[in-house]
Image (cartoon, rainbow, N blue to C red):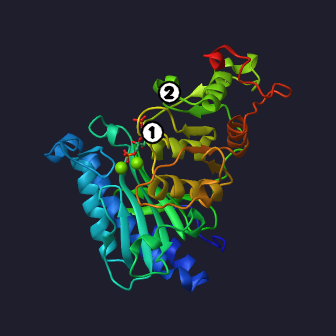
Amino acid sequence: MSLGSLEIGSRLDAYLAQAVAADQGLADVAAVIAACAEAAVDVSEVIGRGALGGGDLAAQGEQNSDGDVQKALDVLAHQRFTEALRGAPVAEVASEEAEGIMLLNAGAPLAVAIDPLDGSSNIGVNMAVGSIFGIRPVGATAENPLSSFTSPGTAQLAAGFVTYGPATSLVLTLGFGTQIFTLDRAERVFRLTSPRIEVVAAAKEYAINASNARHWDTPVKAYIEDCLAGSEGPLDKNFNMRWLGSLVADAQRVLLRGGVFLYPGDNRKGYAQGRLRLLYEAAPIAMLMEQAGAAATDGANRILDISATGIHERVPLVFGSSEDVACVAKYYGGRNAAAGRSPLFGQRGLMRS
Ligand SMILES: O=P(O)(O)OC[C@H]1O[C@](O)(COP(=O)(O)O)[C@@H](O)[C@@H]1O
Ligand SMILES: [Mg+2]
Ligand SMILES: [Mg+2]
């Protein structure tokens, strides 16, 4: 489907109506997106009031499924999103903030994986956070709700994330390109502001939490060492580095400016598969990236081809400009960018350690 005559500034509901008019099969998906958008407007208002809201959004509570301490805003966003999804054609929800699969409307056709509040370490310091969702058909085995979530990311019908930053934006795909909508706060509606994102094939910016450098595996150490070498190294370009501590904000920058994001597996206890979760972080972001001409891999496999076996499963995640991601994948394959230097990992100081 193409966007037809929709203009910049069109409301999200008009966009969804046009999608449904072109393909009736998208009606349920559109209803779920509208529910997520409604919840996002409420969450955005709470975040926008900040300390004036009367409560401490960073107040710590219980541990979630992953062992992270939940903050008040994690819980509030989880409640608001699941409440909105209850009013949509959703049978099952896999949320970061709930241990098991939540059963909503029996017999409904869709299942949703959500990270209600992404970038939790930014709560309370007035920095960007977000919400991420991936929408899938309910699995073949109704008695086994997990079956809705064990198909590969290619089964997703739509995916999106909301960034609560200086502006609140909704980055969305229904499988025909990636669009960005911006929240019109006065009217409490999202309006189309970027009809078709096209990520540049290569850029000079990478994002990684460098404080973990000593724990990285050889391919990641080699790649980052070569980034740091700039134009004097095999990659032959000078890089900039950004790490916002919020996957959605880093992903939005990559969509708009290109570059590469890495959260690899590392040698810390519990981090063999990195930190990010396949169902409600990596798979939705991967769909948005691919729909914008970018790529996402775990180093060896396309993220969208990977199937989860549990709802909170982690996966090493590298995404961004297609040539940059392909370059990182070469390092994982034991080669680096410099022709004739393979196998290379004994040649450079960092790699000999
Ligand atoms: O603190 P670290 O290890 O740099 O991890 C940061 C990453 O963790 C996350 O905060 C994980 O998401 P949650 O906040 O939803 O748990 C990402 O948004 C971010 O990219
Ligand atoms: Mg997250
Ligand atoms: Mg979260």
Q: Nearer the viewer, residue 222 or 283?
A: 222
Q: Is residue 109 above or below residue 36?
A: below
Residue pointed to by mark 2: 215
Ligand 1 occupies quarter: top left
Q: Residue furthest left?
A: 54
Q: Is residue 18 above or below residue 303?
A: below
Q: Does residue 146 appear in the picture of this structure?
A: yes
Identity, as a three-letter code, of the amino acid under mark 1: Tyr
Q: Residue furthest top?
A: 349
338 vs 24, left or right, is: right
Give the residue drawn at x 50%, y 67%.
Answer: 150
Q: Quadrant of residue 175?
A: bottom right
The reply to whether discs 1 and 2 touch (Cβ–Cβ < 8 Å) is yes
Residue 163 position in % (x across, y down)? 42, 50
Q: Dot 2, crowdedness within 10 Å: few (<14), some or many (≥20)? A: some
Cα distance, mark 1 to mark 2?
A: 10 Å
Q: Residue furthest right?
A: 340
- Give the label on residue 123, or none: none
Residue 348 position in % (x across, y down)? 70, 16
Residue pointed to by mark 1: 271
Q: Quadrant of residue 34?
A: bottom left
